Image: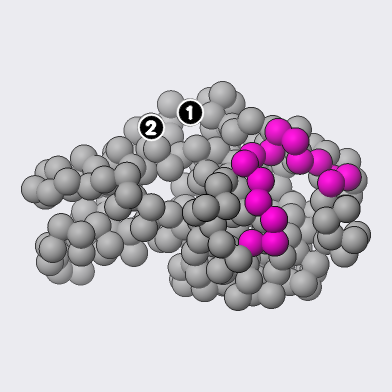
Amino acid sequence: MKIKACLFDLDGVIVDTAKFHFIAWKEMAAELGFDFSEDDNELLKGVSRMRSLEILLDIGKITRTDEEKLILAEQKNRRYLEFVYQMTDDEILPGVTRFLTDLRSNGMLIALGSASKNAPLILDRIHLKGQFDEIVDGNAVSKAKPDPEVFLRCASLLKVEPSVCLVFEDAQAGIEAALNGGMNVIGVGSSDNLSLADHYIPGFKKLDYELLSKWYN
């Protein structure tokens, strides 16, 4: 098998915190005087907090200074963290824990590559932190997906070449980031919303190391 490392996005792949982000952004938009829809929220998937705020302000046709943007971003994060601190293992998406254990038992290196600055906290809350050899989050990188920085950083820490890395992503920007980094990529979710990935899976219930071996031998 040419794949030596599996790299995972967090939101929508390991755990569904996207719903918490949406509620927090929607509440902020309402306070700013406009509606923020689920379709609008699709534009925020896989991008950094500050870039997400800029997109939201563009949707509302609102201008703020850099200082005001920092304040708004912090307000949104406080809302989001209220949900995160209530998280339990039940928030882990179906099949994820079994799949991570399967990868480990077969000697696969595992890393998390997420734009979220709260990734370590979330992994602590759902008791999965120990499953990852390396964690690269929004605190460790400066460029948002589709720039490949977060995934290339994972590969560097794992001491493997990008070509032997397999990325699991639920956002188009993340898929593009993996490809821009010269990596293999599996889209998690509907193929209607994700293009360019090698393969698509609805989730991890039926995925195992044996199937990956067939796909990437």
Query: Which residue position is annotated with label 1?
Result: 87
Q: What amino acid does circle 2 point to?
A: Phe
Reply yes or no: does residue 207 show up in magenta.
yes
Q: Nearer the viewer, residue 74 or 26?
A: 26
Q: Secondary structure at mark 1?
A: loop
Q: Residue at x 38, y 32 (%)?
A: 83
Residue 121: percent from left, percent from top:
51, 41
Magenta-span inclusion, residue 125: no
Q: Secondary structure at mark 2?
A: helix
- Residue 151 visible in the current orientation: yes
**Residue wearing tag 2:** 83
Q: Residue at x 70, y 47 (%)?
A: 132
Q: Is residue 135 left or right of residue 209?
A: left
Contact, CB < 8 Å: mark 2 with mark 1?
yes
Q: What is the quadrant of residue 150 in the picture?
A: bottom right
Tag 1: amino acid: Met
